[in-house]
Amino acid sequence: MDSREVYEKRAKYYGRLLDKLSKNIDCISNLRLLVVVAIIASVSFANSMERYLISWVISLFGSILFVYLVCRNKRLKEKYKYVSILKKVNVDSIMRLEGRWTEFDDKGEAFQDENHNFSYDIDILGQGSLFQWINSGNTHMGRTKLADILTHPYSDKVTIIKRQQAISELSTKRWWRHKLQVEARMVTEENRNIELLIDWVKTKYSLYTNSWMIIVFRVLPIVTVSTFLLAFVGHSIIKGIPILFIIFQLMLLLINRKKRNKDFALVYKYKKSILVYRRILRHFEKVSFQSEYLRELSTSLSNNKGLSAMKQLKRLEDLVDRIENRNNILFFPINVIFLWDYQCLIELERWKNESGLILEEWLQKIGEIEALSSLGTIAYDYPNWTIPKITEKSSILQAKNIGHPLITNRQVCNDVNIQDPFRILLITGSNMSGKSTFLRTIGINLILAYVGAPVCASNMTCSIFSIHTCMRISDNLENGISSFYGELLRIKEIVKATKEDTQVFFLLDEIFKGTNSYDRHIGAKKLIKKLQNNGAVGLVSTHDLELGILEKENTIRNYHFQEYYKDDQICFDYKLRPGISTTRNALHLMKIIGIEEDR
């Protein structure tokens, strides 16, 4: 059974289960109403017959039954929500396989940077992006981590191989990955940036960690309650003494009240986030993983005392619940008598001392769990894709049947072979023939390779490169920069990168298109030679067929895409062929839109 059949089967199953749960919820709602009516009628009848004992018994058992039905109804609604999310996860999976993933709301646009080395040019973030396609994370940290590893992939072979093993293992755990999504979605997290929370947990308040002050805040309520009992129950001391103690404690609560309220408000703000992260950790800790990377991830989720991150977040969650009680006006007397604010602050400082400094690391790890789960979906959905081989040799990119991962079910695959001495491919071809798409195919598959995911190819071997692109450059009116000058600035950065230690892999699409043909040809030729001399590897697409002469220098190879005509219509097969393009279609395209030669 392939992945689509599994998703469809599960979606139908959850749909039937939702119908059943909906009927049960309606039934229990009706039963609750019936119980209330029955209690009122029975009690009224018993009272009219002066059977008061029976009336009390009916009221007691009726109330117990009503409470049970309320609790039962609540559990069914929670289950209904859980199953609804499970169904949506499977429906989303079907949409992803059908190519309708471009309808997903989360595109990662908040992380987009047009000046990034490669992400804007090869659709890593934004509408129709790699992020939109694979992201199944629901927390702020999960989305942030996925965007981070896609834009800053690993550059060492050992880590990449470890991640490949981890993603391969997660790909076999479909149910675990789906349940992870459900656990994260059961509580709606506002996806807030958690920097304020991180800063807060790193801030220390010595007042609440001072041993003598802790003793004072602990003992004072005991003394106050004791004097109250002695005065109003034992009548052994005057009543003014406990009143003075209460007034003194009230004054203590008024000191720094605004500051305490601000700190407590910050904790309230992230209450849902804390709950979501704790649920994810609970789900993660239930499984014993085999891959080294996941085992290391699991081991790192504890503090220096060996307390697990899940238990520590549960403890913080309980503290937040205790703090939240103070918002109830009826709780105010308890706050005064027991100095509740100070007791909570003491516990919070103790928690911060134990786990505050490591909380950020934990949240990063939680985000990585979600990111790895997202990447695991690729291997499950596309078992025919390959795990690339990472080689320590330089200047190598070899792939068989490589296609664009985001062109769902419509990929036209090609072979690519880059190795010394041929380190640069010059791609020519007519308009719309597939040059730019082929460049993006190579770039996006390299990113997948470096994050440890399968690639859309039957076989792939690659060196570790630093990827740089120059493909989508437009005018920047705000900064007064033309597209041509913007292109020059980007190329300047690429040339600068080639002078550093890491080997650069570049993708250049129609370079210097903002200037005249003579300057474009001379400039492109000089740039390619410069990149070649600096040891860079990459692809250049161009309409300048004259650049094909560079192949004579034995380090550059020419390839092209071409079109063909059928019933006077232009068609493309998007197949890569050796040599320089021999066809042109610009005039034919102009004719199609009505621009013809005057007679």
Image: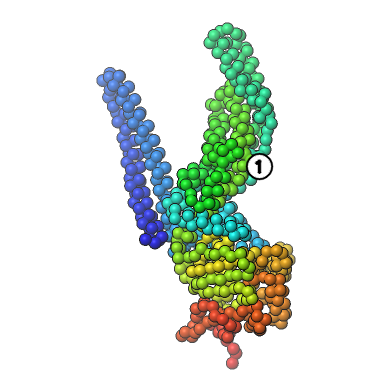
Which residue sits at x=47%, y=60%?
A: 379
Question: Residue 176, position in %: x, y?
Answer: 45, 50
| Dot 1 crowding, Cα within 10 Å, few <14, some 14–19, many 20+ | few
Can you tell which quarter of the image residue 393 is in? bottom right
Examine the image and state in which quarter residue 306 appears.
Answer: top right
Residue extending furthest top? 236
Nearer to the camera, 461 or 115: 461
Kindly state the secondary structure of the residue where label 1 is placed: helix
Q: Circle 1 sits on which residue?
A: 199
Question: Quick check: 320 above or below 139?
Answer: above
Residue 215 lies, in percent from the top left, at 64, 22
Query: Residue at the location (49% across, 83% down)?
Result: 569
Q: Which residue lies furthest to the left in this view?
A: 49
Three-letter amino acid code of the residue under disc 1: Asp
The reply to whether residue 148 is visible in this rendering is yes
For the point 61% across and 36% down, the residue is: 354
Who is closer to the viewer here, 71 or 581? 581
| Image quadrant occupied by the N terminus | bottom left
State left or right for residue 288 relative to residue 5. right
The image shows a total of numbered marks equal to 1
Return the x and y of residue 582 as percentages of the image width and height.
Answer: 58, 86
Q: Is residue 96 above or below residue 354?
A: below
Query: Considering only vertical position in the picture, is 197 above or below 393?
Result: above
Judge whether residue 106 can be spotted in this image. no
Residue furthest bottom as drawn? 599
The location of residue 510, given as percent across then percent down, is 64, 75
Q: Which colour scheme is used?
A: rainbow
Residue beneath the point at 53% across and 34% down:
318
| Image position of 173 (left or right of 332) | left
Quarter placement of the C terminus: bottom right
